[in-house]
Amino acid sequence: MCGRFILISPGRVLAAQFELQHEPELTPRYNVAPTQQVPIIKIETSGGRQLEMLKWGLLPFWTKDASISTRLINARSETLSEKPAFRAAFRSRRCLIPSNGFYEWMKEKGKKQPYLFKLTDGSLFAFAGLWERWESKDGVGIESCTIITTDANELVQPLHDRMPVILKNKDYALWLNPMAKWELLQPLLIPYSSEEMNSYPVSPKVNKATYDSPEGIEPTFREGSESQSLGR
């Protein structure tokens, strides 16, 4: 799954990588948590790409229970075209969710030790995501998103059996194309190569959703212990 992630690349890097017309002004985030506002990239009606801030936790347009979003922060890739919560969004409201890494937890002696997973060069990448617009009885609209997950690769497996889908840059256009069919999109929803990723333990302070500090992404190897990195 993916329950926390980071986004620390400056706006100029996002604008270049995702072909945005305008450079976004973003504050570095070291511990993005569900229900918070997160940047996504989606297609405008004109066909260009735009960055918007959406609530993390999908609110299907048909639901009467807004609290359901806390249970829909992730969507399983295998059932996107079948599950009512994701089916409509998967057909025509796919998005990119920028990130520099995500957290997973290992249970150690009754405690939860967080690990940060990144690309080996620490560069910006994008999760495959879906977005949706929901409207309350009072006409208040909320736009929200979810991160798609797939089977874990060899690096993530010791901690969890699922991981977020990380898209290759060359696949951004296809994923965002509202006309693309399942047969073309399905091959994109696979585990990212573990050879191109690494991981290391970080401070347990990130267990708290309100903790958001650069120190949170620093390695915390304990003196006298073997290397705890899950990287290569």
Image (spheres, rainbow, N blue to C red):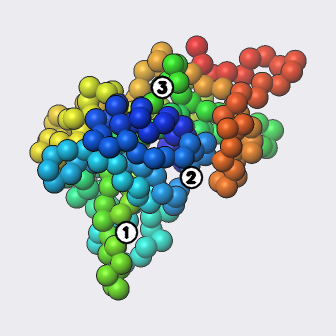
Question: Considering only order in the chain, which callout, 1 or 2, is on the residue closer to the N terminus?
Answer: 2
Is 136 placed left or right of 71 in the picture?
A: left
Vertical side of 13 occupied by 80: above or below? below
Residue nearest the viewer, comparing 62 with 23: 23
Vertical side of 69 occupied by 139: above or below? below
The residue that disc 2 covers is: 33
The residue that disc 3 covers is: 123
Mark 3 is on which residue type?
Ser
Q: Is residue 69 visible?
A: yes
From this viewpoint, which residue is outermost toward the right? Answer: 224
Question: Considering only order in the chain, which callout, 3 or 1, is on the residue closer to the N terminus?
Answer: 3
Q: Residue at x 52, y 19 (%)?
A: 120
- The reply to whether the C-beta atoms of the residues labelled 3 and 2 are less than 8 Å apart is no
Question: Considering only order in the chain, which callout, 2 or 3, is on the residue closer to the N terminus?
Answer: 2
Mark 1 is on which residue type?
Ile
Q: Secondary structure at mark 1?
A: strand
Residue 206 locus on image (x, y percent): 69, 45
Disc 1 versus disc 3: distance between alpha carbons?
31 Å
Residue 174 locus on image (x, y percent): 20, 35
Nearer mark to the viewer, of 3 and 2? 3
The residue that disc 1 covers is: 142
